[in-house]
Image (cartoon, rainbow, N blue to C red):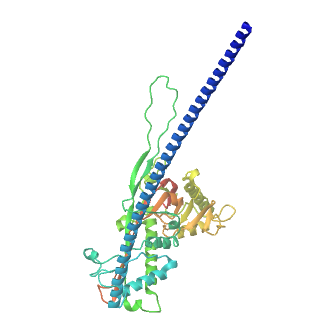
């Protein structure tokens, strides 16, 4: 019994110890669990606190920025509004002053304005000028003491920005060469450019086994060319009675006629202008007694090449069939003088006398060499190239140039200097109105290899 009791007691103690251990373990687990939950809650609380603080900070910054932008926009709007109010008040004041002046004077104040002088708008031009002349007050739009340099500050110029264009339109409708020449608008009569006067040189060489080197070849040579210019002017007068004549638009007629005459003068100067006559140098003026008879490879390219006829006073030597054959040879020499790759766009320009000579030419089968132009845009075709009549070219006579061949648009240029203007002066001679029109044009070479001149020997 004693042993059994001992065993029972031992088992009981072991059981008690086991239960105590389990209880302690459970308590430890609960403690750890509790501490973990408290840590999680603390972390969650900290994160929420930080997020709320950050959100509040961003919200505050956004509101501050919006208020700043709103304040700046409001300030800008107020400034613009203030400026507009000031401008409106100034305009109102000006209008009131003008209204008072009109009421006092009983007439309108003349204003200076740019005027379109195209043919389709001539009525607008005439109406504007007539209205201005009739309503002009002394010292406003016209010169008080006449047209002279000293008193020019007392009046104003009616600057016609389109007058150059009107003159060019008149020119282009009246001549062959003026229709095809390039027109450039420039701001100064000192316009210049570089043109090539000599081509670069190349040579054939062999392997330099002696290491002797080689002589330099010629480089491209260029020269600066300056345009030549001339000023053409008209200074007519009209009476106030003629302005008021209902049977004729004197202003429109005078303006159109002046533009026509200026156009004719510029057209003539383009072909044969002479600087000694205060004209821009024309195409026929760009000829040198020595250089012009050289080929493109040898010539100073500031000058056009001249090809002379084979006999004096005629297009070619001989009569009848022989004459026709020789003229053909001369024409073919003129064509072949232009590089084959540059002949697209080339034309013949001939004088009236030269055209009549070409009309007489026949081939061996008695067929005319000058064929009709199927497009109807030229006087005919010669060896497939258009033929145009240019009235300012020379006669078929010794020393004259009755024929030109080439691409004129790429060879020569007409310059519109941009100095055109008109002045009207009703004060110098009471009852009459002095009118002054002026325009300045210039010329300059581009590529002289593209245009060849044929001169009678």
Rendering coords of residue 322 (x, y %): 61, 60
Quarter-of-image position of residue 317: bottom right
Q: Residue at x 37, y 90 (%)?
A: 240
Quarter-of-image position of residue 258: bottom left
Rendering coords of residue 384 (x, y %): 63, 60
Which is nearer the eye, 439 or 213? 439
Q: Is residue 271 left or right of residue 103?
A: right
Which is nearer the eye, 21 or 311? 21
Which is nearer the eye, 178 or 129? 129
Label tally:
0
**Residue 303 seen in render:** no
Rendering coords of residue 68 (x, y %): 42, 57
Rendering coords of residue 31 (x, y %): 58, 29
Residue at the extreme front of the image, as rendered: 1
**Residue 447 seen in render:** yes
Q: Residue at x 40, y 90 (%)?
A: 242
Quarter holding the N terminus? top right
Quarter-of-image position of residue 266: bottom left
């Amino acid at each position: 019994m004693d042993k059994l009791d001992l065993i029972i007691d031992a088992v009981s103690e072991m059981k008690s110890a086991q239960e105590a251990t389990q209880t302690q373990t459970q308590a430890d687990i609960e403690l750890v669990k509790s501490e973990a939950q408290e840590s999680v809650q603390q972390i969650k609380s900290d994160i929420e606190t930080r997020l709320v603080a950050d959100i509040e900070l961003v919200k505050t910054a956004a509101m501050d920025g919006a208020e700043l932008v709103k304040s700046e926009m409001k300030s800008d709007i107020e400034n613009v509004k203030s400026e507009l109010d000031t401008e409106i008040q100034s305009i109102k004041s000006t209008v009131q002053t003008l209204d008072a002046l009109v009421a006092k004077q009983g007439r309108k104040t003349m204003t200076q304005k740019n005027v379109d002088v195209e043919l389709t708008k001539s009525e607008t031009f005439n109406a504007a000028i007539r209205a201005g002349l009739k309503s002009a007050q002394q010292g406003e739009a016209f010169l008080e003491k006449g047209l002279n340099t000293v008193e020019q500050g007392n009046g104003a110029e009616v600057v016609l920005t389109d007058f150059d264009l009107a003159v060019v339109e008149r020119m282009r409708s009246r001549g062959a060469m003026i229709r095809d020449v390039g027109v450039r608008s420039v701001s100064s009569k000192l316009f210049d450019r570089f043109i090539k006067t000599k081509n670069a040189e190349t040579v054939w060489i062999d392997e330099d086994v002696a290491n002797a080197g080689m002589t330099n070849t010629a480089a491209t040579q260029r020269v600066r060319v300056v345009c030549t210019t001339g000023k053409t002017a008209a200074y007519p007068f009209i009476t106030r009675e003629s302005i008021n004549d209902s049977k004729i638009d004197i202003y429109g007629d005078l303006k159109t006629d002046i533009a026509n005459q200026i156009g004719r003068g510029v057209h003539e100067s383009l072909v044969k202008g002479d600087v000694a006559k205060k004209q821009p140098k024309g195409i026929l003026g760009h000829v040198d007694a020595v250089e012009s008879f050289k080929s493109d490879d040898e010539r100073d390219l500031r000058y056009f090449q001249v090809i002379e006829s084979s006999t004096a006073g005629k297009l070619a030597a001989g009569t009848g069939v022989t004459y026709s054959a020789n003229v053909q040879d001369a024409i073919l020499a003129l064509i072949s003088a232009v590089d084959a790759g540059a002949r697209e766009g080339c034309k013949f320009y001939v004088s009236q006398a030269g055209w009549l000579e070409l009309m007489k030419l026949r081939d061996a089968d008695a067929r005319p060499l000058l064929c009709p132009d199927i497009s109807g845009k030229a006087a005919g075709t010669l060896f497939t190239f258009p033929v145009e009549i240019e009235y300012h070219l020379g006669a078929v006579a010794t020393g004259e140039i009755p024929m030109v061949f080439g691409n004129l648009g790429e060879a020569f240029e007409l310059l519109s200097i941009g100095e055109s203007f008109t002045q009207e002066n009703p004060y110098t001679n009471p009852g009459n109105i002095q009118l002054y029109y002026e325009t300045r044009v210039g010329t300059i070479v581009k590529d002289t290899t593209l245009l060849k001149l044929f001169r009678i020997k």
